[in-house]
Image (spheres, grey):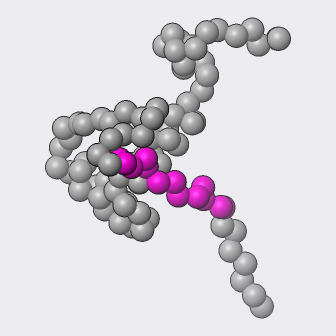
Amino acid sequence: MTKTLNQSKSPPATRAPRRVNGKLPPGCKSIQAIIPDWLYYKIHAQASLNCMDWSDYLYQVLQEQFTLSTPSLHESAGLLPKQDIHS
């Protein structure tokens, strides 16, 4: 009897944009944040468990977070114009 695993495909790992000759790529911004030690080490640990560089891991987490956001949240924040549902 063979055992089949029901594994959902995870999205392919995407690399965070890298500096080229010390300059940011076009269309990219850099952020710097002061975070508590526990969060810093948790990010590094999770990246390691996923066999990823920590910056690539954080890039993927942020991409997923904003990809999953609903348009209504963007509309209420004034980031998108309101659209007619029936059009």
Q: Name the side, left or right, on which 79 lies relative to 21.
A: right
Magenta: main secondary structure equals loop
**Quadrant holding the N terminus:** bottom right
How many labels were placed on the picture?
A: 0
Q: Is residue 81 above or below residue 70?
A: above
Q: Is residue 80 above or below residue 44?
A: above
Q: Name the side, left or right, on which 26 lies relative to 1.
A: left
Q: Is residue 68 above or below residue 47?
A: above
| Residue 43 x %, y % | 31, 53
Q: Residue furthest bottom?
A: 1
Relative depth, front residue between 15 and 2: 15
Residue shown at 18% from the left, 43% from the top: 36
Residue shown at 17% from the left, 49% from the top: 37
Q: Name the side, left or right, on which 33 lies relative to 51.
A: left
Which contiguous range is marked in magenta? 8-20
| Residue 40 x %, y % | 23, 50
**Quadrant holding the C terminus:** top right
Q: Name the side, left or right, on which 26 lies relative to 6.
A: left
Q: Is residue 39 above or below residue 72?
A: below
| Residue 33 x %, y % | 23, 36
Residue shown at 32% from the left, 48% from the top: 21
